[in-house]
Image (cartoon, rainbow, N blue to C red):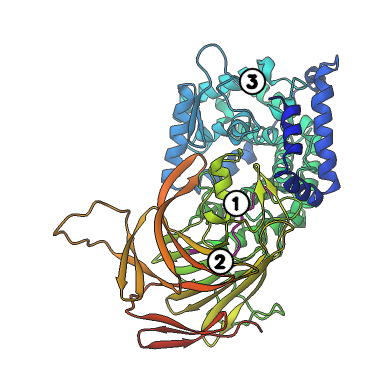
Amino acid sequence: MSDGDATLAALTDRQRLPLLYHTARNMRARQLAGVAERKLRHLLVPRLPIDFDARYDRSRPSVPPADTTPIAANTAVLRAQLPVAARARFRERACDLTAGEVTFRNRTVTVEDGPGVDWVGTGVPAPTTLWGLQFHGFVFLGGLILGYGGPTDCPSAAATAERWIRDWDDADATRIGGPAYLRRSWTPHAVSLRIMHWIRYHGWAGDELDARTSRVLRRLVAKNATFLANHVEHDVGGNHLIENGAALAMAGLFFPEDGGAWLDRGLDVLAGAADQFLDDGGHFERSPMYHAVTVTRYLTVLDLLDRRDRDAPAAIRDVAVAGSRFLATIAPPDGRLPLLNDSAFGYALPLESCLDYARAVGVSGLSEPALATDDGSGLPGDATIRQALEASGYYWLGDGRDRLLVDGGAIGPHHLPAHSHNDHFAVLWWADGRRVLTDTGVFEYLPTRERDHARSVRAHNTVQYADVEPIPTGGSYLFGRRIEPTVRYGADSGVTYFDGVYRRRARSGPQYTHRRRIFAVEDCWLVWDAVSADESAPARSRLHFAPTVSLASTCDGDQRRLDVIDGPARPSRSNTADRRSVLGYVYPIDATRVTREERPYYPEFGRKVSRPAVTLRTDGPDASFGFLLSRTRFDDVDVTRDGDRVAELRVDDTRWSLPETDG
């Protein structure tokens, strides 16, 4: 099917039409104009009798001199923050190059099996995929740069990398202006990654880089920076725009004599993109993974400016500081990114490494994030509150090694919800520092079953009414009519609470209201859901557990309990006691049916893992049910209701009066 046929099919698909409408109506005029411009370029540029690649080469007749000292020092600092295991993985990737192989997203492709590199062959995913984007962005150079101290530590891999750089320069398939060039080697995001990795490689290799390869690299960086300056992705925005700005700023600093225009342009882009960061320092796409990526770019530019004795624009320094503090606040007990929305391990710097990098380049105050205080937001200054990242919609209940994280925010910005999921009021739980309740992560961005599942409400630790999505989704990034949650969060008489509500109003399909109240008392978390609708249908509350734990069920009369055991399930052995520790307990309350199953988990791009899951179900137009998470085992758990809310929690002989959260 041609691109035109695919577009026509999408436009005539009745199920997709509402998604296209709501996606387009929320886009900004600059985005729509950019889509039109790219399509026009694809149509016209390859047909014009003009050698655009040669024009870009002629635009800089001489190869500018470079100063690699600052980037070499910055790269050494960055590498020093990585844990031993991460550096070992980078070294493995570097070794793969000598065999002509590249691995991204847990997929290995042989790109060199004969003369030259197969840049756009049938076996190489296109740059429109994440794999192809990283490949044409030369991200594989990170294996050398971050795995080794210099070329003498990995001479074969370094020789391969330099041969591939020269091959890319010579290949016809990588010329500007060829068919679909903006979707292949010259998509601006790939150009940005390429510039940054080439600059880092040159600094890493230093004096050991032969003169010919140095000249080729410097010429390529200048050519790519010239192209990027003409194709900054203001129309796409988001993390793409930040990658563009960082690449241009790095190119400008790489060429101290000739790069002033690129530096100014890059700093302007980064300063302008500062409005992507919310009042709590979080990136507005609400993906912890992309937050770490974008903050790392700001930290790098900040450090390079400092090494050049140049003052950074205040907006850039503010983002680096506030964004780092956001990471410190959202950091879980296990020190790894929470996989909220489009997030996966292995793409960004590890969370702790990112924070160490921030400290190493001069960002202070990251060890003790401030508690929420009464600043007019309605949050009392109660020491039992951990942190509220209100603007991003993330709320902690609990502290230390036992914590619950609630996703109470809206999806990403209305004009750019591409990396958002239907995860309203989802909860994540850490017990004794271990990840117990997990989000799902992301498998890929292509419109596959895995993509559809990862974005769906059924993939998250929240409630689904009937079989509908709170916000209809489709394709890779389409979103239908938005919903706007409202949240109250605070503490009263030693009980920390979260109270969130949203209403689904749709022209087709069921309309309903979902309200989730959560109360934290000592080492217990009561999660209570109320669903109100016009007609009777099942309401399902799903809990997805980490694949590193297993579940054991107990039923004593009407009291049901799930024991969360540290360690995956294993075959039972008669007369053998299971001495593995119990991390916590789950007590379903007022659910008419509780079922267990295995459901998918995507901790890394391209990786699918099975994990235990539980579904609590009740029926009716007005459903009210919930569950208790506890680090302590109880024989009796019950609640006292007042309408659709719970007024009291009883566990064995202890009672807690729960605050009314309506204000």
Separation of marks 2 and 3 at Cα, in angstroms: 46 Å
* Residue at image mark 1: 292
Report helix, strand or loop for mark 2.
Answer: strand
Mark 2 surroundings: few (<14), some (14-19) or many (≥20) residues within 10 A: many
The magenta span reads 418-428
Instruction: Note whether residue 154 is visible.
Output: no
Check disc 2 and give the amino acid type.
Val
Whether residue 164 appears in magenta in the rendering, the answer is: no
Check disc 1 and give the amino acid type.
Ala
Instruction: Note whether residue 587 is visible.
Output: yes
Report helix, strand or loop for mark 3.
Answer: helix
Which residue occupies the foreground of this view, 87 or 556? 556
Report helix, strand or loop for mark 1.
Answer: helix
* Residue at image mark 2: 406
x, y percent for residue 193: 65, 36
x, y percent for residue 209: 58, 24
Q: Earlier in the sequence, mark 3 or mark 1?
A: 3
